[in-house]
Image (spheres, coloured by chain):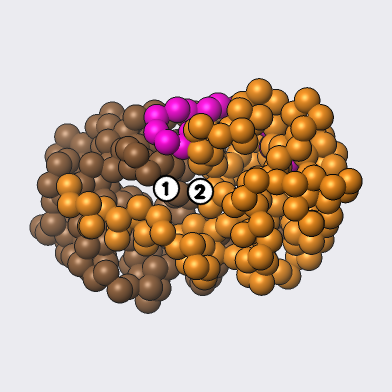
Chain colours: A brown, B orange
Amino acid sequence: MDPRSKKTALRMITHGLYLLTVKHKERLKASTVSWLSQASFRPPLVMVGVKADTLTHKMVEESGRFAINLLALDQTAMAQAFFKPVEQDGNQLSGYVFEPSPVSGAPIFVDAPAWFECQVLDIVKNGDHSVVVAEVVEAGVRQADAAPMALRDTVWHDGG
Amino acid sequence: MDPRSKKTALRMITHGLYLLTVKHKERLKASTVSWLSQASFRPPLVMVGVKADTLTHKMVEESGRFAINLLALDQTAMAQAFFKPVEQDGNQLSGYVFEPSPVSGAPIFVDAPAWFECQVLDIVKNGDHSVVVAEVVEAGVRQADAAPMALRDTVWHDGG
């Protein structure tokens, strides 16, 4: 396989940008992720790629729960903030105000236009990211008409 | 969970639109899919949602292989063609000329800007679509500067 062709073809996959959040043993975490897709209508499932050797992966695996904060097109600064280690200060993570999600207490950012909360069903480990298959068990919308962020609209479009 | 919130939040996930093709026992099939994401860099993995009760699912599961044809923004007619049953006529499927992929012989459409071919690693069955985790084993590019199609640019944006 030609590595350049592989890279170019995989870069044509349409990805978004999201904040994955998790609470485990009173610890909170938020990470920017891109590899997320719906995976079923009934029950409502999603699949998300989570980097294998990370605290986020460990917390998702051990707690069995996480939340996804959707991001709007103009929230690149928020996405950028959670590429880095998270600093908690009261009800803020890295400067962004959050509330606890209803089921697991994962951080829900008040600036995110929508969010949903997930229960992990399966974790498939074959590469540098795991495929986490999860059922959507709770959801909320703050701004229904937000234009969501696509990865290729940002400076981070480096897949493949 | 409020069904409207769930629907609105899941619709904010960024999805593309692709043609999944497969060859099994000399039979060829092409289907339009939307739930696809990269899932690892090393090895290069993807995850794709494939409707559970379909011929495509059966052929992917039994052959263990499939190809993904990327689509450009102006190829909605091509996406629409493969929502319907496929008609083969020589080297055409539903009017679109194809060549066999190098590894499995799955149809590669000559009009698709890029494609990649996959080896199935896992199939996770929890809902009306299965999560197919697969390794990218071959890839090709015909038009590297094509603007890829996002689901929300089309009339079919009805997820959730």
**Quarter where residue B138 is shown:** top right
Report the magenta stretch's main SS: strand
Look at the picture and state if A100 lies above or below A62. below
**Badge 2 vs badge 1, beta-carbon distance below 8 Å:** yes
In the image, B149 versus B91, the foreground residue is B91
In the image, A127 versus B153, the foreground residue is B153
Q: Secondary structure at mark 2?
A: loop
| Residue A65 in the image, given as x and y percentages of width and height | 26, 37
Q: Is residue B41 magenta?
A: no
Instruction: Name the residue furthest bottom.
Output: A74
Q: Secondary structure at mark 1?
A: strand
> In the rendered structure, which amino acid carries the disc numbered 1?
Gln
Look at the picture and state if A154 lies above or below B115. below
**Quarter where residue B136 is shown:** top right
Number of dots carrying numbers: 2
> In the rendered structure, which amino acid carries the disc numbered 2?
Trp
Write down the residue under mark 2.
Answer: B35
Write down the residue under mark 1.
Answer: A38
Look at the picture and state if A120 lies above or below A140. above
Q: Residues within 10 Å of mark 1 (few under 14, many from 20)?
A: many
**Quarter where residue A114 is shown:** bottom left
Q: Is residue B122 magenta?
A: yes
* Magenta highlight range: B117-130
Q: Residues within 10 Å of mark 2 (few under 14, many from 20)?
A: many
Which chain is mark 1 on?
Answer: A
| Residue A87 in the image, given as x and y percentages of width and height | 24, 56
Residue A142 in sight: yes
Image point 85% across, 42% down: which residue?
B100
Image point 61% across, 28% down: which residue?
B58
